[in-house]
Image (tube, grey):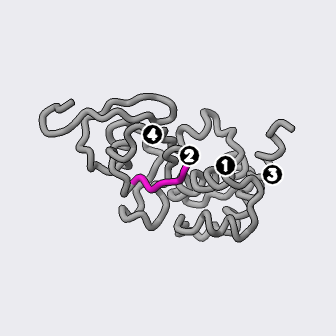
Amino acid sequence: MLTGRDYVISLTVNGERHDIDADPEMPLLWALRDLIKLTGTKYGCGIAQCGACTIHIDGQPARACVTPVSAAVGTEIRTIEGLSPDATHPVQQAWIELDVVQCGYCQSGQVMAAAALLEQNPSPTDADIDAAMNGNICRCGTYPRIRAAVKRAAELKRAGEPA
């Protein structure tokens, strides 16, 4: 449906439908932050190199800064706000328990990358963690705490799963 120069685009974000008036080539990051008002996903580099904008599209990690909104139509998008309503997701619990955050700017992307890893691999090795988290840059250098938190989140996730 055309409205002026832009299009009405329907996105499903965190289980809710949002109809937005946006150019189909607009980066999903700006649709999420500026139009839908979900500001947990951060802008870092704009070229998919830092990971601050990591979200899930149909359960897979994706960089929202380079994903056009048109590519997300018909998918399930999950942002940091949709991971859990009360920070009870195992990754969020581990991040808090191990005091991972220093400045915090990169952390929503780090958490989303870790959550995607644990959905695919409930018992990751150090090499698995390093591979999955590669490209999520932390300027504060909290990488040892991030790795420890991913391991702790895996423990929490396994402990919370039904036998």
Q: Is residue 54 magenta?
A: no
Label 3: element kind: helix
Counting residues from the N terminus, which is met first, the one under dot 4 or under dot 3? 4
Cα distance between the residues tagged 2 and 4: 10 Å
Label 4 environment density (alpha carbons within 10 Å; few <14, some 14–19, many ≥20): some
Magenta part of the chain: 59-64
Q: Between label 4 and label 3, give the one nearer the viewer.
A: 4
State the image quarter where residue 143 is shown: bottom right
- The residue shown at (65%, 69%) is 130
Counting residues from the N terminus, which is met first, the one under dot 2 or under dot 4? 2
Cα distance between the residues tagged 1 and 4: 18 Å
**Residue 75, disc:** 4
**Residue 30, disc:** none
Instruction: Specify the amino acid type for callout 1.
Output: Glu
Q: Which residue is mark 2?
A: 59
- The residue shown at (70%, 71%) is 127
The N terminus is located in which quarter? top left
Q: Which of the pair 115/93 is nearer the observer?
A: 115
State the image quarter where residue 20 is shown: top left
Cα distance between the residues tagged 4 and 3: 30 Å
Counting residues from the N terminus, which is met first, the one under dot 2 or under dot 1? 2
Label 3 environment density (alpha carbons within 10 Å; few <14, some 14–19, many ≥20): some
Q: Are marks 2 and 1 in contact (CB under 8 Å)?
A: yes
**Residue 155, disc:** 3
Label 1: element kind: helix
- The residue shown at (60%, 64%) is 133
Instruction: Specify the amino acid type for callout 3.
Output: Glu
Instruction: Specify the amino acid type for callout 4.
Output: Thr
